[in-house]
Amino acid sequence: MLDQLTIPDPNGTGDDFKQVGPDGKEIRSNYLWERWRRGADSGPVFKRSGTMWQMNEVERKALETKWLLEMKREQAEGMKTICRN
């Protein structure tokens, strides 16, 4: 799923070239994530049509909350491991 929220490298080299939108402004790395969180489509530059982009705002918020809880749980487990050692 996360590949649907990732801005692809425009030339596949990992260099410092910046992508710009139709307005000439730089497209930041969180562009798709922010559009998805707001309930918007993937925008004019990146045509995405996966299941994630078909979710309504309530479904998106529920999935975001699930992800955040999973990340917090993983962080807590990591802290437990560190404290035990």
Image (cartoon, rainbow, N blue to C red):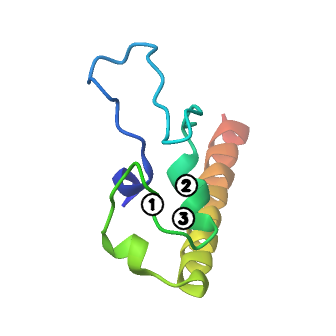
Q: Residue at x 59, y 69 (%)?
A: 64
Report the quarter where the N terminus lies.
bottom left
- Spatial CA distance of label 1 from label 3 is 7 Å
Q: Nearer the viewer, residue 13 or 61?
A: 13
Kindly give the residue lying farthest to the top in the view shown: 15
Q: Is residue 70 visible?
A: no
Residue 69 got which mark? none
Q: What is the secondary structure assignment of the residue under circle 3?
A: helix
Q: Amino acid at mark 1?
A: Ser
**Dot 2: few (<14), some (14–19), or many (≥20) neighbours within 10 Å?**
some
- Spatial CA distance of label 2 from label 3 is 5 Å
Left or right: 29, with 52 as reference point:
right
Q: Which residue is mark 1?
A: 42
Asked if labels 3 and 2 touch by Cβ distance under 8 angstroms, the answer is: yes
In which image quadrant can residue 51 be found?
bottom left
Query: Above or below — where is 76 with respect to 16?
Result: below
Residue 78 location in percent, x, y?
Answer: 62, 45
Q: What is the secondary structure assignment of the residue under circle 1?
A: loop
Asked if labels 3 and 1 touch by Cβ distance under 8 angstroms, the answer is: yes
Residue 5 location in percent, x, y?
Answer: 44, 53
- Spatial CA distance of label 2 from label 1 is 9 Å
Query: Above or below — where is 57 with respect to 78?
Result: below
Instruction: State the count of labels.
Output: 3
Left or right: 24, with 44 as reference point:
right
Query: Which sits earlier in the primary sequence, circle 1 or circle 3?
Result: 3
Q: Nearer the viewer, mark 1 or mark 3?
A: 1
Q: Which residue is mark 2?
A: 33
Q: What is the secondary structure assignment of the residue under circle 2?
A: helix
Q: Amino acid at mark 3?
A: Trp
Q: Which residue is mark 3?
A: 36
